[in-house]
Amino acid sequence: MNSNEILKELAAVLEARKSESPDSSYVASLYAKPDKMLEKIGEEAVETIIAAKNNDREQIIYETADLWFHSMVMLAQKGLSPDDILNELARRFGISGHDEKASR
């Protein structure tokens, strides 16, 4: 399965979890507690930073996967999809980071 298919399948699962009971689904429990969902993103970001600082390749992969997962939960909760983010990255491609930042 390619990365685009993985993102689309995960997005579909996250969308389906919106109608599940918070008691039966971890993702549904995050939807029920938006502050907890946002805390998880912060927690996973910190853990990713620590793994990178420690040059621990396996931990970097593991923690970044957690960070991406929880970020995707937040995106789904906000009605956004991976395509929205990929389109923004595509828009920025070939533009100097300095120029892109100055344009905001």
Image: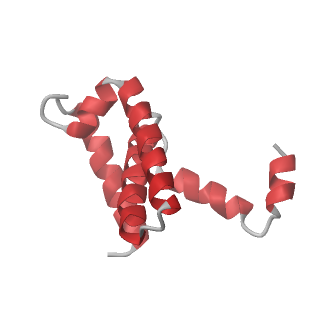
Residue at left 32%, top 55%? Answer: 10
The spot of residue 55 in percent (x, y) is 48, 68
Q: Is residue 62 above or below residue 37?
A: below
Image quadrant occupied by the C terminus: top right
Q: Is residue 54 above or below residue 43?
A: below
Q: Quadrant of residue 40?
A: top left
Residue nearest the observer in this picture, 90 or 69: 69
Q: Quadrant of residue 4?
A: bottom left
The spot of residue 34 in percent (x, y) is 39, 26
Image quadrant occupied by the N terminus: bottom left
The spot of residue 48 in percent (x, y) is 46, 54
Residue nearest the observer in this picture, 67 or 89: 67
Residue 73 as seen in the image, left or right of residue 84: left
Residue at left 77%, top 70%? Answer: 94
**Residue found at the far left of this picture:** 24
Residue at left 44%, top 32%? Answer: 38
Residue 77 as seen in the image, left or right of residue 52: left
**Residue found at the far bottom of this picture:** 1
The spot of residue 3 in percent (x, y) is 41, 70
Q: Quadrant of residue 95?
A: bottom right
Residue nearest the observer in this picture, 57 or 36: 57
